[in-house]
Amino acid sequence: MPTELPSSRAALLIESDPDLARAFRELIRLAYHSSVTFDVVVSLTEGLTYLRAHPVPVILMDLSLPDSAGQEAVERVRETAPSSAIIGFHRTSDATRLSDAIRAGAHEVLPVIPPSAETLRLSITNALVRAAHPQTVAEPVPSTEALPTSSLPLAKVAHDLNNCLTSINGYTDILLARLSVEDPSQYCAEQIKLACGRAENLIKQLRGTTSPSLVPQPSTPINSAPAA
């Protein structure tokens, strides 16, 4: 998959607001300084129909579409266009909806709508790279007998990482509450929040590679006597 938009049939925008659709069309023109085919559909149903007939490298989709929204919408687009790079966006600063889009398989999100031309171009490039180099599937987990003793600290590492992310998330929420929507730092704080969401998914995968039977259990004191 290319990491730059080609000049023909490069992208699809799924957006029901005509004003926002025009804004994105202008941003694409400014970002790439050339004529780029940028088709627009107004609903998820139309988008899925379009994608079945016209595969495109990049899909930009509103996460609040009239006929479907959020995580479910992203999942349906991923199922229909598994090779396309997907960028989700939401007009309000709803970090939860953006995080859900990442969990559903979006390669990038836009927390500020409309973005600048530079931000849009960077987001498209990032999404194309992530779609071209998906995370490799982990090797099958060997049986409990074959697992090395290092599996024990692996469970603890996952636990400690989760604690660190909880702390980062908490401080990020405080920062977001103090920043105004117009503050440029708002974007950076939201990106930290989204990165934490991705890291949480990685921790879940890390935990999945450890057998529950290998997690340390509380030991019984040697001098304890059985109950009468």
Image (cartoon, helix red, strand yellow):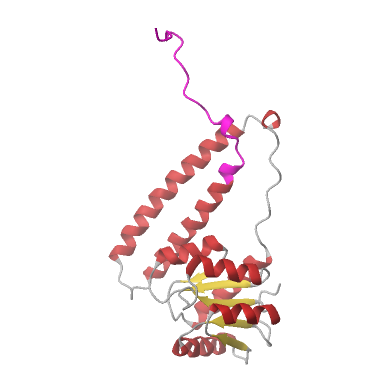
Q: Could you tell me residue 162's position as x and y percent?
A: 46, 45
Mainly helix, strand or loop, the magenta region? loop
Q: Is residue 135 above or below residue 132?
A: above
Q: Quadrant of residue 155?
A: top right
Q: Could you tell me residue 35's position as x and y percent?
A: 62, 92
Residue ranking furthest to the bottom: 35
* Number of numbered discs overlaid on the protein picture: 0
Magenta-highlighted residues: 206-228
At x 68%, y 40%, the residue is 141
At x 30%, y 63%, the residue is 177
Asked whether 192 falls inside the magenta stretch, the response is no
Residue 55 visible? The answer is no
Q: Is residue 133 left or right of residue 182?
A: right
At x 53%, y 70%, the residue is 73
Q: Quadrant of the C terminus?
A: top left
Q: Is residue 168 left or right of residue 36?
A: left
